[in-house]
Image (cartoon, rainbow, N blue to C red):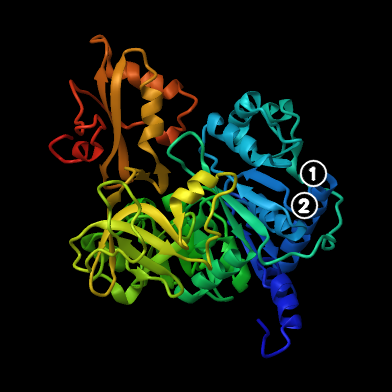
Amino acid sequence: MPYTYDITMFKETFEHEFTWLHGFLRNVHRYGDKLAVCVPGENAPDAMWTYRALNADANKLGHALMGCGVRKNDVVMYMLFNSPAFLFCYIASHKIGAINAPVNYRISSVELCAIFEDSKPKVFVFDDNLASVVASALIESSYVPPHLVAVPVGDTLSKASLDLGAVDFASFMADMPTENPVCEPGHIYDETTRLYTSGTTHRARAVPMNNVNEVLSAHDVMMHFPLNNTDRTMNMTPWFHRGGLHSGGPTPTLYAGGEVVILREFNPKLCLRIVAEHKITFLIGVPSILAILARAQEREHADLSSLRGIVTMGSPFEKKTCEKYLDLFTPNIFNGYGTTETFWNTFLRPYNLPEMAGTAGQACTDDEVLIVKVKENGERAEPDELVAKDNTEVGEIIIKSPAKSTMCYVNNPAMTAEKFYKGYHYTGDLGTWDSNEFVTVVSRKDDMILCNGENIYPTQIEAVINQHPKVFECAVVGVADRLHGQSIAAYIVPKDSSLTVDEIKRFCFAAKELSTYKRPRFYYLVSELPHTATGKITHYKLRNPEAQ
């Protein structure tokens, strides 16, 4: 179809320059001497990078990666705590057209092995503390990354990392040029970042994001907080999560020209001290972390007057909890709901609280969030088959968010077909909504457990426990936990009457397939489990108070 004007220059410019990297580089020349990154020192001076210095170090890493043969669309995978090294990897990969693949540093060696085999990274960067997990994964994996780089905790690498043949991160970058690496031009549809979200089996799902998703995720945060170049953000959750990376993490903050303050791992007392001393304006964390922070603030009474807002996601606040936080932290609390695939998609703003506490809020400005019927035959509802807006009828939450989602998985067409349909992501979450389309999340179709911000699927844990020779069958469910959101409970029917809880605990502790956070907290030996007429375990019956 002919256009009414000459689109040539707009198309060429937009398609190659509407990228996260161009936004960051604009800030390098706008705010060259402005502080971009700060790592507060506990017993040492703060480590700091201006925008110009951050860009120079990212360039050095970019040249080092290219020296390893990394080119456009190659995967650079890193298993790192929140740190300068994480930032260098993220920015450098954007610069050379590689795909960022930050992975959960809490996963087991079996899970890491599967991710190696799925994405086949050309370079793998890891924290020295994680060398033993990496070593086990490398032994088991059919694919071994050609280049291993380790980030030491102190001045030197551990023997475990050296035994793997890993290169020290600082040495890897040393003597590299500080000028921008010369690469192929980027495109708005290039995959820039790949995040792994837990699957219902041992195979995690690879969620790709392109330049448009990165830029518009940043815009979304800048619009909803709002966030600007005067802000100083600190994310209390790991950056390998979508919320950690994109909600007040490196992506929006460095795109807006603000300052990222790095908290390696959450420590409530340290966190409060940093907020007070560094005048943090936005603090980001999941509800379970905020609960711990609230306890600490009741003791410490830190000066939090610099906060313009606390942003959380993952689960809703009850009204009583919300009122407490409004009084204890700041009158500006924001709560978002979404998925790894689509970022956040509903939002509660300060003016919605505390009245609408307990809900997930209304759809974000550029998103469409609907609740469709759940059919008894298991068929997928059409996007126009909506439940009543009466806050009573339960349906499945579906999300259309093309600005923040590529609407697919990498190397997984079957799961793509199952979870994406007509532009919508079928989340598997069950919820209700009211006449103003405020969404309330009720439960999950797949019985996923949410503990400390981590998505945990019962079927994976059940598969491990069922391997025990004395176990007949088991069911794993999430039970309410005031501190962690949910804790994991395992209900086990013994095959052998000699089975003990201690024996099962030891078995789970030794299972390489189970990361620490996936081990059950509660174990119950029971005579039977509830089943449907077709023999399926009815997990929801185990979650009620009588069962517990």
Residue 164 circle label: none
Tell me the crowding category of disc 2: few under 14, some 14 to 19, or many 20 or more residues within 10 angstroms, Cα based: many
* Residue nearest the observer in this picture, 425 or 339: 425
Relative to the observer, which residue lies in front, 174 or 148?
148
Mark 1 residue crowding within 10 angstroms, few (<14) / some (14–19) / many (20+): some
Identify residue type, mark 1.
Answer: Phe
Residue occupying image coordinates x 73% and y 70%? 16
Q: Are marks 2 and 1 in contact (CB under 8 Å)?
A: yes
Reply above or below: 518 against 415.
Answer: above
The residue labelled by disc 1 is 172
Residue 27 x %, y %: 69, 73
Q: Is residue 493 visible in this depiction of the protein?
A: yes
Residue where numbered disc 2 is placed = 61
**Residue under the point 63% across and 36% down:** 116
Q: Secondary structure at mark 2?
A: helix
Q: Is residue 45 left or right of residue 481?
A: right
